[in-house]
């Protein structure tokens, strides 16, 4: 399932075209696609923050779609992450 999603990403095709070319039912593919996104969110993976980066604004995007932009204050950023 995940390898098919990765293959589709690399193909550059629409979901519908990829399904037709590979003999996959669209409903099945969309189910796989949604499950792969759930796996990404559930993995709890973190990204590294480069402290030497000089951009003055950071944006936090929560899984529910809420976006918060703030100055690059790491203490405040840490508190916002813990809220979720």
Image: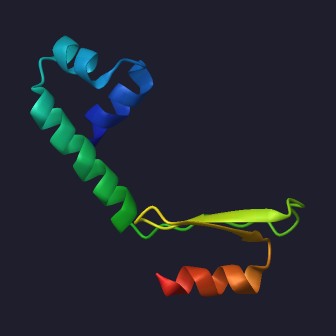
User: Which image quadrant is residue 42 in?
Assistant: bottom left
Residue 82's spot in the image, x, y percent? 53, 86
User: Which image quadrant is residue 81 in?
Assistant: bottom right
Viewer-proximal residue among 48 and 15? 15
Residue positioned 72% across, 67% down in the render: 49
Residue 44's spot in the image, x, y percent? 43, 70
Tell me if I can see residue 1 in this picture. no
Viewer-proximal residue among 66 and 22? 66
Residue positioned 74% across, 86% down in the render: 75
Residue positioned 83% across, 70% down in the render: 51
Residue reaching furthest to the top = 21
Q: Along the horizontal axis of the image, is 76 left or right of 67?
A: right
Residue 84's spot in the image, x, y percent? 46, 81
Rendered view: 31 above or below 15? below
Q: Along the horizontal axis of the image, is 39 left or right of 12?
A: left
Residue positioned 16% across, 43% down in the render: 31
User: Which image quadrant is residue 21 in?
Assistant: top left
Residue 72's spot in the image, x, y percent? 80, 72
Q: Quadrant of the N terminus?
A: top left
Q: Along the horizontal axis of the image, is 43 left or right of 68?
A: left
Tell me if I can see residue 80 in this picture. yes
Rendered view: 42 above or below 84? above
């Amino acid at each position: 399932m995940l390898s098919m999603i990765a293959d589709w990403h690399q193909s550059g095709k629409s979901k519908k075209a990829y399904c037709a070319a590979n003999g996959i039912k669209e409903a099945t593919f969309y189910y796989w696609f949604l499950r792969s996104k759930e796996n990404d969110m559930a993995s709890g993976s973190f990204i590294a923050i480069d402290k030497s980066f000089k951009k003055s604004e950071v944006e936090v995007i929560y899984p529910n779609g809420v976006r918060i932009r703030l100055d690059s204050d790491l203490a405040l950023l840490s508190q916002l992450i813990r809220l979720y």
